[in-house]
Amino acid sequence: MTAFLAVLAVGVGTFLSRSIFILALADRTIPPRVIRALEFVGPAVLSALVVALMVDDSGAVAVGAPEAAALAAGGLAGWKWRNLIYVVAAGMTVFWVMRVWF
Amino acid sequence: MPLVVAAIPFGLVVGLAITESGIGSFIGWTGAPIIFAGAAHLTLVTLLGTGTAVVAAVSAALVINARHMMYSAALAPTFQKQPRWFRWLGPYALLDQMFAIVILRKDDDPDDFRTYYLAAAATFFTFWNIIVALGLLIGPVVPATWQLGFAIPVMFVGIVVMSIDRYPKVVAAIVGAAASYLFAGLPNRAGLLVGALVGIIAGVLADQRSET
């Protein structure tokens, strides 16, 4: 139940962030600085999130070389091919191969 | 269509994350039509699965979707020429991929724009709900030793890298990661939100500096 409420809350919040300017502020101008700041939300949050997933509750790093190498491979694939399919394929291949050794 | 294909691994990973999180397949799946945003949905179920406080998990997912305000602002002038019902319905389907294709047609004839938008939205909606459900089916079948769940952070790294088109975004990403690590010991995994905020501020500062 709690999980469903969480889903609903994120659903409503997502709709609000997508509709806010279209519905409410259509005839006002938005400060360009605000728009520019929003561009940094994605990179900052997602990279903070990756780190959060790699540590345990006490804040210590909870993963080893295979994970680090896999993330690096995924990043390189994304940079080179700009395609999520390649990102997952490269990252997971490196992850599985490395785990055989470590 | 290529964008729908690109969404396939994403949707599968979301479905997989739901099975791993233990929040219940159906409840997890309802996020596909209700949230209708891959990154936020994935973040929410992953964090709920790791025992993050619900408020923190919801906040993190919402912060991730704050970028959609940018899309909303960019399309606001186009939507001014649209009927009221469409101004309410349209934003629901304003995914990253939708924005990428409809922004190219923002100056189209309003009726043409609406037809195009609705067709694209219906396509994404149908495929997305099916793909996430497929991920749910695949999740339990795959042996646990494969650790497919690791595809989640891998994918996030890929998204970050693909979103980087100028140097201040690199700053935002690196500082965000570093701050998230420094504050990782905070209760309820609040370090994630602190890290995100510090990263955004760093990006804005780097942006201002690069302009002057």
Image (tube, rainbow, N blue to C red):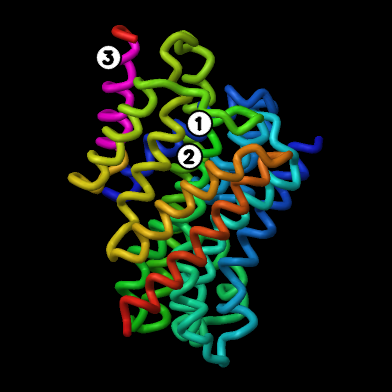
| Corner quadrant of residue B26 | top right
Mark 3 → mark 1, Cα distance in angstroms: 19 Å
> The residue under label 2 is which amino acid type?
Val
Identify which residue is drawn at 56% across, 86% down: A26
Question: Do the numbered discs 2 and 1 sit on residues whose CB atoms are within 8 Å?
Answer: yes
Q: Which chain hosts label 2? A: A
Which residue is under mark 3? A97
Q: Which chain hosts label 1? A: A
Which residue is under mark 2? A50
Please identify the quadrant where the N terminus of chain A is shown.
top right
Mark 2 → mark 1, Cα distance in angstroms: 6 Å
Q: Is residue B211 above or below residue B53?
A: below
> The residue under label 1 is which amino acid type?
Met
Q: Is residue B21 left or right of residue B55?
A: left
Type of secondary structure dominating the magenta stretch: helix
Please identify the quadrant where the C terminus of chain A is shown.
top left
Name the spot of residue B148 as percent of width and height, x first. Answer: 43, 21
> What element does badge 2 sit on?
helix
| Corner quadrant of residue A5 | top right
- Residue in the foreground of this view, choosing between B127 and B60: B60
> What element does badge 3 sit on?
helix
Q: Earlier in the sequence, mark 3 or mark 1?
A: 1
Disc number lying in front (3 or 1): 1
Q: Is residue A91 left or right of residue A52?
A: left
> How many numbered marks appear?
3
Name the spot of residue B74 as percent of width and height, x first. Answer: 44, 78
User: Furthest-left residue in view?
Assistant: A80
Which residue is under mark 1? A54
Q: Which residues are magenta?
A: A85-99
Name the spot of residue B92 as percent of width and height, x first. Answer: 57, 61
Q: Earlier in the sequence, mark 3 or mark 2?
A: 2
